[in-house]
Each structure stands twice: as structure tokens, then as C-alpha cells.
């Protein structure tokens, strides 16, 4: 029979507003975190990363915040645009080798 | 800009058949990976490959799976006897493992495998 996928949380924002996407990770030993964007039918695309010795890192229109105390990661997108619509995944890099992905959040930008 | 390429983009096969998914990682990258994503679910790690051998594999990567770097350019994933539950998007990724991109993995566009 057909398998049922996970119901992904969805964030709907108005074009021009800021978006905040959250992620909880599980492994205290993770030393590197990445946010990926995945558009329909495409592979994950790197957005921004942060090492565990930092708590904030900024890129172009994006900021990642890391709270190691509560094992929480967030991605902030400033002035969200229709082209930002996609599924966003956080990922942990454990021991410098494999990536462990989170469940993902759908971002929908309304014009 | 160099990118990871994968072929075919879509593969349809009968249950029990063997399939080979092909990837060309970015030149000069040292680590190679396969991940899969079942429709609507998160991306899952299958295997990592370095220095011509498997460096790590997940529980999903059982005896039905194998990887190979046959010619210094291609990186392949073989599934010997496909099952219905192998239907998924399969992503190849590569990592330069040095310099400013020490840990960044670059993903290909994926191959959609459909097992009937």
C-alpha cells in the first residue's frame, strides 16, 4: 500500500515579512549545524551553517541562531520573498561525517 | 560553478530487479555520500565513502545495497533486488573535506526510484 509521509509543519508569511523557522536537535555531541532549502523536485541546497562554538551567524538575508542549552536552532529570513517558498531542513553534522536531517518545515510566502 | 550530477532523473523498475544509480561528484572532492528521501519524509543518511571504501553506513544500508567508485569519476549506488519500500528520491552528495568548505556537503538533484 501507499506509505503515509510525515505531516510537515507549515509557516505562511506575507511577502516582505520576516520568517523564523525552528528546529530542535538531539545530539549534544553535534559540532556543526546546517540549514538546507529544498524546492520541489530538487536536492537540498545549502543556506547557512554554524559551528557549536558560536551562537549566531549571519548571511545574506539569513541569520542562524544556536542555543546549545536547549538544543535549539533557528533560521531567520529577512524580507521574505516568493522565491523563498520551499521546505527547510536543519541538519546536524555528527563526528564530521554524516548529516542527520530534521523533519522539515514548509515555508509558504503569500504575495 | 561545479555541481554534483545524477543519472537517471527517474528510474522505474520491477520489484526484485537490480538498479544502479549514478552520480558524478564535484571534481577534487574527497568524501561521497548517498542519502534517500521517501516521499514527504526527511532526508536519511545511507552511506559515506572515502579513500575508496565505506567509512560509515546506516541501518538502512543492508546487504542489498552497495557502492562503488569504478573509474575515479562516477560514484554508484546499486540495489541488488529492489523492494517496494525502496521507492524514494536518492541523493548523492560530495564534500571537499578541506579548506573553508570542510564540512559542507553539496547535493545532486536526485534520482527518483519507483519500484512497481
Image: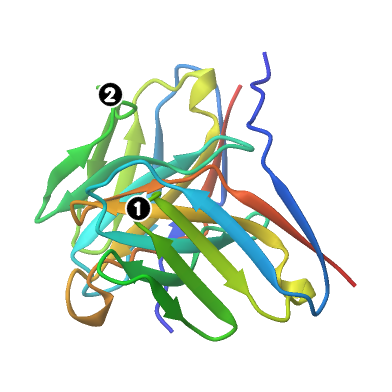
Identify which residue, A2 or B84, lies in the foreground.
A2
Q: Quadrant of residue B59?
A: top left
- Element type where label 2 sits in the image: loop
Whether residue B107 appears in this view of the structure is: no
- Are the residues at dot 2 and dot 1 in contact (C-beta closer than 8 Å)? no
**Which residue is pictured at 42% across the width and 78% down the height?**
A57
Label 2 Cα crowd, 10 Å radius (few <14 / some 14-19 / many 20+): few
Identify which residue, A11 or A40, lies in the foreground.
A11
Q: Going by the image, does A72 lie left or right of B80?
A: right
- Element type where label 1 sits in the image: loop
Q: Residue furthest front?
A: A69
| Nearer to us: label 2 or label 1 | 1
Identify which residue, A14 or B103, lies in the foreground.
A14
Instruction: Give the residue number, with chain letter if any, for mark 1.
Output: A69
Q: Is residue A75 above or below residue B53?
A: below
Give the percent coordinates (x, y) of residue A108: 78, 60
Instruction: Give the residue number, with chain letter if any, for mark 2.
Output: B62
User: Which quarter of the rendered picture does the N terminus of chain A lie within?
Assistant: top right
Q: How is the image coloured?
A: rainbow
**Which residue is pictured at 29% across the width and 58% down the height?**
B74
Identify which residue, B115 or B44, lies in the foreground.
B44
Q: Quadrant of residue A14?
A: bottom right
Chain letter for the residue marked with disc 2 in the picture: B
**Which residue is pictured at 30% across the width and 29% down the height?**
B61
Chain letter for the residue marked with disc 1 in the picture: A
Q: Residue furthest top?
A: A1
**Which residue is pictured at 21% across the width and 74% down the height?**
B28
Q: Is residue B49 above or below residue B73?
A: above
Label 1 Cα crowd, 10 Å radius (few <14 / some 14-19 / many 20+): few
Give the percent coordinates (x, y) of residue B89: 53, 42
Both labels 2 and 1 in a single chain: no
Amino acid at each position: 500500500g501507499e506509505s503515509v509521509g510525515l505531516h510537515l509543519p507549515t509557516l505562511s508569511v506575507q511577502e516582505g515579512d520576516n520568517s523564523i523557522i525552528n528546529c530542535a536537535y538531539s545530539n549534544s555531541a553535534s559540532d556543526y549545524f546546517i540549514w538546507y532549502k529544498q524546492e520541489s523536485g530538487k536536492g537540498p541546497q545549502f543556506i547557512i551553517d554554524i559551528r557549536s562554538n558560536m551562537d549566531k551567524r549571519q548571511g545574506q538575508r539569513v541569520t542562524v541562531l544556536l542555543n546549545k542549552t536547549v538544543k535549539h536552532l533557528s533560521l531567520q529570513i529577512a524580507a521574505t520573498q516568493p522565491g523563498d517558498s520551499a521546505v527547510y531542513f536543519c541538519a546536524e553534522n555528527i563526528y564530521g561525517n554524516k548529516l542527520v536531517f530534521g523533519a522539515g518545515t514548509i515555508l509558504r510566502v503569500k504575495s | 560553478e561545479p555541481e554534483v550530477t545524477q543519472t537517471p532523473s527517474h528510474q522505474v523498475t520491477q520489484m526484485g530487479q537490480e538498479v544502479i544509480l549514478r552520480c558524478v561528484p564535484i571534481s577534487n572532492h574527497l568524501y561521497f555520500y548517498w542519502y534517500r528521501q521517501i516521499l514527504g519524509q526527511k532526508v536519511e543518511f545511507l552511506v559515506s565513502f572515502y579513500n575508496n571504501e565505506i567509512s560509515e553506513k546506516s541501518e538502512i544500508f543492508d546487504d542489498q545495497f552497495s557502492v562503488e567508485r569504478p573509474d575515479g569519476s562516477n560514484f554508484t549506488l546499486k540495489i541488488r533486488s529492489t523492494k517496494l519500500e525502496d521507492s524514494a528520491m536518492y541523493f548523492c552528495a560530495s564534500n571537499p573535506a578541506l579548506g573553508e568548505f570542510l564540512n559542507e556537503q553539496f547535493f545532486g538533484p536526485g534520482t527518483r526510484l519507483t519500484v512497481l
